[in-house]
Structure formats: structure tokens, C-alpha cells
Image: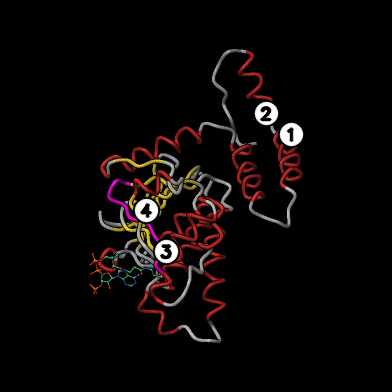
């Protein structure tokens, strides 16, 4: 059994809560925490009880205030590319997760923390949240997928401004530019995320997993998204859930999906 030091994992009502738990360091992502994220995502993929995932930070101040800057002294010419690729690979496990993943952004989401939120399928921010990619203030740039995911989400102009200035933006601003889906008072953050997931959990699981494939294909130049979509559509039509969904509609009742 894997033992977590910096992440808390809890499954309740089919939702896996992954909480980064280093509040005294504003939940900064050190190497160990990234490793733990890989393990947590394998739990998310493999545990059948888990139907949706919420990622958040411990405490009321920070979601994740970035990669752990105290470990930056260990980065050198030899391992720097690996440093970036390791973060990219870890976050890509979140993006590709066949179950819906929401970032509950409960405070500072900076650098690697903002990139972590960007890798989630959706983002809900509390009204005190501040988001940003301040890497250029440290002489680097976002290396955990942030340059790509932010640009795809908010467009080039806004992405250039956020990355080049390194400034933090408010939750309200993030909402305006589509960086977060919703902004709510902090006390309502979890309830909002749960209400989104509880709705998705009632939908056909294979259709949800295939939606992840299709939407991610938009961002993958090596794939023809329309071909992926047609393929995913065909996969869905082979499921019992497709028959059940159609039958339930015609019988004017709620469908009972089995994920098969
Ligand atoms: N890496 C390592 N430690 C971090 C951290 C990070 N990314 N962000 C915060 N911390 C630590 C601080 O060093 C401090 O530790 P200490 O008490 O042992 O000195 C603790 O978390 C609390 O942070 P502090 O800076 O005192 O809080 P604040 O309210 O004054 O400021 C921030 C909050 C978020 C503005 C500030 O912590 C900050 O700028 N953090 C770095 C953000 C960043 O550049 N992230 C991108 C990294 S690529």
C-alpha cells in the first residue's frame, strides 16, 4: 500500500478528493508531491468506486503556490529537461483521466499550481483565489505544460500577457477570460465542485471517458479530432449504456447506466 506524505486522499460518495497538504509551504509542489500525484492518479484511474476527482489545496490560503522553489537549486543543465518532462507527464495523467477532474482553486494557484489547475478538466475558483504564472520573475518559464494549456484556454493575447508579466490575476479576472469556469465564495467551493461532478456521475461513463479523448484530441496536432470523434461515437454505440439511455428516454424514466 502506497503511503502519502504530502497528499491526502479520501473517497466519499464516489468522489476522490486529492488534497495537497503542505499548508506551511502554501502547498508548493516538491518532487515528492509530484511523485505522489502519479500514484494518486493511478488510484483515480483504477478504483471503480471513484467516478470523479476534485483536486484542492489544504488550508484557506493556497491551492498550490507553485513548484517548490527551494528545490530549484538542484536543477542543472543535465536534469532540467527531465524536470520539465516529469511535470508534464504527471499533469498529462490528470488531463487524460477518463473520469472528470475538477480543480477546486481555493487560494493562490501560481506557477506549477496554476499549471496543475490547467491540467484539470474544469476549474472552480473561490473569490479569494489568485492565479498566475510568475516563472519569468525567477528567470524561467512555465515548464509543466502551462505555456500550452493556458494559450489554448484563453488565447494567445491573454496568455502572452499573463506569462510575460508574471502578474497574478484575481478570480474575477480569471472568470472573465475563461481561465476558470466559476467563481464562488470560499465556503461554497467544494459544494459547487461536487454539484458539477454529481451531475456528470449520472451520465454514461463510457461517453464521459470518450469525451475526454475527443476534447483532448483538439489539442493534439498529431490526431485528426474528427476521426477521434467518429471512433469514440462508434465505441459509445457498442455499449449497453447506449441501449439503456435510449430505452429509458422512450420509456420516460431515468437511465441506469452501468459503465458498460
Ligand atoms: N516554493 C517553496 N516555498 C514556497 C513557495 C514555493 N513556490 N510559495 C510559498 N512558499 C513558502 C514560503 O517560502 C514560506 O515559507 P517559510 O515560512 O518557511 O518562509 C511559506 O510558503 C509562506 O509563504 P509567504 O511567502 O511567507 O506567504 P505570503 O502570504 O507572504 O506570500 C505568495 C504568498 C504566494 C505571494 C508568496 O509565497 C510567493 O510569491 N510564492 C512563490 C510563488 C511563485 O513564484 N511560484 C512559482 C514557482 S515556479
Q: Nearer the viewer, residue 80 or 204?
A: 80
In the image: residue 202, left or right of residue 129: right
Q: Which residue is mark 4?
A: 56
| Residue 145 % position (x, y) | 54, 63
Circles 4 and 1 in contact, beta carbons < 8 Å: no
Circles 1 and 2 in contact, beta carbons < 8 Å: yes
Measured in 3D between alpha carbons, the distance from the residue under mark 1 to the one under mark 2, in whole angstroms, is: 7 Å
Q: Is residue 224 visible?
A: yes
In the image: residue 87, left or right of residue 172: right
Q: Which residues are magenta?
A: 126-134
| Residue 78 % position (x, y) | 56, 86
From the viewer's perspective, is residue 35 above or below residue 159? below
In the image: residue 8, left or right of residue 164: left
| Residue 75 % position (x, y) | 47, 83
| Residue 40 % position (x, y) | 47, 59
Farthest bottom residue?
77
Q: Which residue is mark 3?
A: 133
Residue drawn 61% across the image and 17% down it: 249
Measured in 3D between alpha carbons, the distance from the residue under mark 4 to the one under mark 2, in whole angstroms, is: 33 Å
Is label 3 or label 4 in front? Answer: 3
Q: Which residue is mark 2?
A: 242
Instruction: Classify mark 1: helix, strand or loop.
Output: loop
Amino acid at each position: 500500500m502506497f503511503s502519502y506524505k504530502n497528499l491526502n486522499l479520501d473517497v466519499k460518495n464516489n468522489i476522490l478528493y486529492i488534497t495537497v497538504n503542505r499548508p506551511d509551504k502554501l502547498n508548493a509542489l516538491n518532487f515528492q508531491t509530484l511523485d505522489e500525484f502519479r500514484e494518486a492518479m493511478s488510484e483515480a484511474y483504477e478504483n471503480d468506486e471513484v467516478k470523479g476527482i476534485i483536486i484542492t489545496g489544504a488550508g484557506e490560503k493556497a491551492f498550490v503556490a507553485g513548484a517548490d522553489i527551494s528545490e530549484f537549486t538542484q536543477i542543472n543543465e543535465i536534469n532540467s529537461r527531465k524536470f520539465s518532462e516529469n511535470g508534464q507527464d504527471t499533469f498529462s495523467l490528470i488531463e487524460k483521466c477518463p473520469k472528470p477532474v475538477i480543480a477546486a482553486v481555493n487560494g493562490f494557484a501560481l506557477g506549477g499550481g496554476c499549471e496543475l489547475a490547467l491540467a484539470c478538466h474544469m476549474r472552480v475558483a473561490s473569490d479569494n483565489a489568485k492565479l498566475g504564472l510568475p516563472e519569468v520573475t525567477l528567470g524561467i518559464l512555465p515548464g509543466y505544460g502551462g505555456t500550452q494549456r493556458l494559450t489554448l484556454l484563453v488565447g494567445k493575447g491573454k496568455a502572452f500577457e499573463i506569462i510575460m508579466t508574471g502578474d497574478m490575476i484575481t478570480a474575477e479576472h480569471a472568470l472573465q477570460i475563461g481561465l476558470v469556469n466559476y467563481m464562488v465564495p470560499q465556503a461554497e467551493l467544494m459544494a459547487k465542485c461536487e454539484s458539477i461532478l454529481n451531475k456528470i456521475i449520472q451520465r454514461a461513463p463510457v461517453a464521459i471517458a470518450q469525451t475526454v479523448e475527443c476534447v483532448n484530441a483538439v489539442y493534439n496536432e498529431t490526431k485528426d479530432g474528427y476521426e477521434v470523434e467518429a471512433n469514440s461515437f462508434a465505441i459509445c454505440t457498442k455499449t449497453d449504456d447506449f441501449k439503456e439511455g435510449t430505452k429509458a428516454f422512450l420509456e420516460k424514466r431515468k437511465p441506469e447506466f452501468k459503465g458498460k
